[in-house]
Image (cartoon, grey):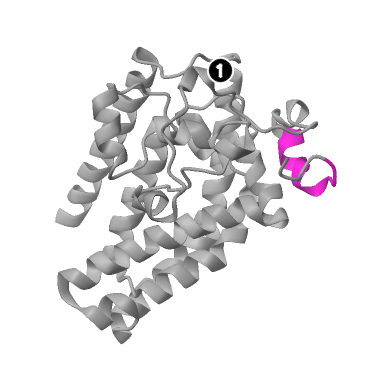
Amino acid sequence: MASRLAKFAGLTVAGAAVGALLLAERARPLRQRTRKELPRIARNAAMGAACQAVIMASEAPLTEAIAKANRRERRGLQHAIGGLPGRIAAFLLMDYTYYLWHVATHKLPFLWRFHRVHHVDPDLDMSTAVRFHALDMLISTPMRMLQVRISGADPQTHNIWRGFFLGSVLFHHSNLRLPGDVDEALSSIVTTPRMHGIHHSRKPEEMDSNWSSGISVWDRLHGTFRADVAQDAITIGVDDPDAAGDIALLPALESPFRMSGHRRV
């Protein structure tokens, strides 16, 4: 009973935080919208629902089983180090490997075909955070399994990182304008909306920056951090001939299987 109440309380807090962020991004928009809001949100929500179904059917049970085996067999980085330092190391390793995976989804043509569906969105807000091709989630499952196995994360550490990651993704995709000094301070630790807005630019030299999805230190370590582009100078989307036609739901889902328009320009 106590565990159910704790889970319900956690879901309630998470729901309230998401609702507050939705209201905040409308009250203090970082960028002007270029498309009608409701059709975009409906399309993105449909894609997000399909992604969640794939995650629950494949990634979630597999990674949870690996995390339980890590705990049972005391294997991987977390258990090699042990204690709180081991948990922190596993958390950081999972976050860093996702940085590397994100870079790969842009640089490898096959992965870009599917990840491009996320970037085609001409506006950037919280709904973009769930706009992915469902097969993108399936393709990333082996990476997620390896990530949990090598890190040695037990179920608790894995759930902490996953909660942090999901919260971060919603936050940095939001269209929330933070005060400049607050955004600057936060961006030294985590990925912020201004940071990620630059990554969603149509310009390749701007898109090829700010790859971090959680902790922002990875961009600083790899020299891929940028904060020198004004948000009103950014055109969100991708720069290829098929971009306009691939915004709608069905063309977006079909786009990875067409040969044209899926190269990085």
Picture residue at 31% right of the left edge, 38% below the top: 187
Between 12 and 102, the one lying in front of the other is: 102
Residue extending farthest right = 259
Give the side of residue 111 with respect to residue 161, left or right: right
Q: Is residue 112 magenta?
A: no
Quadrant position of residue 46: top right
Q: Could you tell me if residue 62 is visible in this image?
A: no
Q: Could you tell me if residue 67 is visible in this image?
A: yes
Between 223 and 60, the one lying in front of the other is: 223
* Image coords of residue 254 (percent x, y): 77, 42
* Image coords of residue 168 (percent x, y): 36, 42
Quadrant position of residue 88: bottom left
According to the picture, the residue beneath numbered tag 1 turns out to be 38
Q: Is residue 259 magenta?
A: yes
How many neighbours does mark 1 have within 10 angstroms: few (below 14), some (14-19), or many (20 or more)? few
Q: Looking at the picture, does residue 183 appear above or below residue 33?
A: below
Mark 1 secondary-structure assignment: helix
- The number of numbered discs placed on residues in the rendered structure image is 1
* Image coords of residue 163 (percent x, y): 32, 50
Q: Looking at the picture, does residue 48 appear above or below residue 145?
A: above
**Magenta stretch in the rendered image:** 250-260
Picture residue at 32% right of the left edge, 56% below the top: 161
What type is the residue that disc 1 sits on?
A: Leu
Picture residue at 75% right of the left edge, 47% below the top: 256
Picture residue at 65% right of the left edge, 40% below the top: 117
Give the overall secondary structure of the magenta segment: helix
* Image coords of residue 160 (percent x, y): 28, 56
Quarter of the picture containing the C terminus is: top right
Between 212 and 248, the one lying in front of the other is: 212
Give the side of residue 45 with respect to residue 159, left or right: right
